[in-house]
Amino acid sequence: MAIERLDDVRMDEIHLTTPVPERGLRALTLGDVVYLSGALYTAREGVYRQVVDKGLPLPPGLADLSNVSFHCSPAASVRPDGSYAVEAVTATASFRFGRSMAAWLERSGAKVIVGKAGLTERAYREWFVPQGAVYLTTVGYGLGATYGRSIRRVLGVHWLEELGIAQALWVLEVDRMGPFLVEGDAEGRSLFALANREINARLAEVYKSLPPPALGRFGEVIVRTDDVV
Amino acid sequence: MGPIPAKVIEETARELTARAAIDIPPDYREGILRARERETGRLSRFVLTEMLANWDAATADRRPMCADTGLPRYYVKLGNEAAVEGGLAALERALRQATAEATAAIPLRPNRVHPLTREDPNTNVGIHAPEITYSVEPAAAWIDVTTVHKGGLFGSDWRMLFPGDGIPGIKRFFVDTLVEGGKRGLACQPAIVGVGIGGAKDTCMRLGKEAACLRLVGSRNPDPGAAALEAELTALGNQIGIGAMGFAGTAMVVATHVELAHTHTGGMPVGIHQFCLSSRRATARIHLDGRVEFRADPAWFTDYYRRPGIE
């Protein structure tokens, strides 16, 4: 059944193992509840700077190990004996990486991006679909302990010296990490776009009893459905 | 009795930092349970159910509930009869030391970087970090230390409204801010929304943040006008049609807390802050005899703190 409204979402539970094969990605439907096992790696501003801006390759062997990259960095520390404590994982807002996304997908070979708040349908169509990539959103944006529990071990940390704990590339071995929701599917559709269409349809009613924005005279948008989020 | 040894403050602050990162405050948990009961959106309900399970996992494992462990900061209420060994400089050093040690031990994510070089000392301590805000309580022989770890980059804003905009103007700005941060769940809602009205532009921002982070869900401002506005804004926020994480729903706001400050006769600055689903705070009262009492209520907005007159 085609998904036209949020109520059409089936929320099927799907378990994937990394590297996720192409047929696994194509089978994902908007709103499916996904759990990941295997290896995945974190990448945010610092890592994008290394790979996209400076053109450095991913650490050797990483692309073969996993095609899942996570817009996040963990709550972590380096213990006095040199081992790593990684206790909680949650995502950071993905639209910050929008301008680097096409180059990132091409250079990293990542096919699954896990993050917060997704990108636009246009971004999925133009950058994700040609690379065969999908986007999964974390849930609640605060399931740090739930996701953290599924970490089996830290397989490696790269660029720790240059980037610091919060920006380094962490390679994690995970067991049934989730739930994540399919936000951008293989056809380039977005779950949040679906949600926003439903929200926007009601906004005029919400604003009916309210005056125009107080500072509209200073250039605020008047029509809230025009927000570029 | 007393003064309070700085070492006691340091140990207490370390414990507070762990509690704030790991344990959801009970009043907020109650608020989320009530939000889930009234939530009609299927995806939003799913989010709230998972959030509740996440808090259980955090408490059971003693691991942070969210990996963005926010920017640790402190609110210190100084009893007028209390004193610290080594004075306020020793208290500040204790809070900074505790922050750095707790960052490695819990661990917190070292979020604090130099704003230009982006260099990370990996301690959450730096220039003007952690922030420490003070207020005074008369006739009290204790020091209350509250830590708040507010994360997130979205959902806070301020406007210089004018007297003619009135309460309808405040409502409009409130809804605008919630819509802006609510889509795609950028504000990590449902949230406690703090609204600071009046003062100067920095005052309204400070009060809005304190209203979001330091009042209990279920509390009301003693000013009847402010209390009425709190109820109206909460209802308005939940009528927008946005639920948890930006899915369609009815649970955008867990509570709205309004705080007021006398302001310029020509202006009405308004600051709005949203304290996210991982609302992190913890409070302890340290008595002059060194006894430490962990408390659910920061008791920050006292009658004295809100006093309108000279005394």
Image (cartoon, coloured by chain):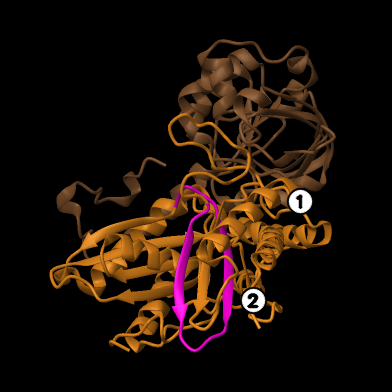
Q: Nearer the viewer, mark 2 or mark 1?
A: 2
Q: Mark 1: which amino acid?
A: Thr
Q: Is residue A71 visible?
A: yes
How many numbered circles does the render carry? 2
Q: From the viewer's perspective, is residue A102 above or below residue B274?
A: above
Q: From the viewer's perspective, is residue A197 above or below residue A205?
A: above
Q: Secondary structure at mark 2?
A: strand
Indicate left or right for B95 with B265 as reference.
right
Q: Mark 2: which amino acid?
A: Ile
What is the C-alpha distance between the residues marked 2 and 1? 34 Å
Q: Residue at x 39, y 68 (%)?
A: B207
If the image is split into quadrants, where does the C terminus of chain A sit? top left
If the image is split into quadrants, where does the N terminus of chain A sit? top right
The answer for which chain carries disc 1 is A
At which x and y percent is residue A136?
A: 64, 37
Dominant secondary structure, magenta: strand
Q: Which chain is brown?
A: A
Q: Residue at x 53, y 31 (%)?
A: B119
Q: From the viewer's perspective, is residue A88 above or below residue B228?
A: above
Magenta segment boundaries in residue numbering: B130-154
Indicate left or right for A27 with B132 as reference.
right
Q: Residue at x 33, y 89 (%)?
A: B311
What is the crowding at mark 1: few (fewer than 14 residues within 10 Å), some, or many (at least 20)?
Answer: many
Q: Which chain is orange?
A: B
At which x and y percent is residue A72?
A: 63, 37
- The numbered mark at residue B286 is 2
Residue B84 sits in quarter = bottom right
The residue nearer to you, when weighing B209 against B217, is B209
Q: Does B139 appear in magenta? A: yes
What is the crowding at mark 2: few (fewer than 14 residues within 10 Å), some, or many (at least 20)?
Answer: many
Q: Which residue is mark 1?
A: A146
Q: Secondary structure at mark 1?
A: helix
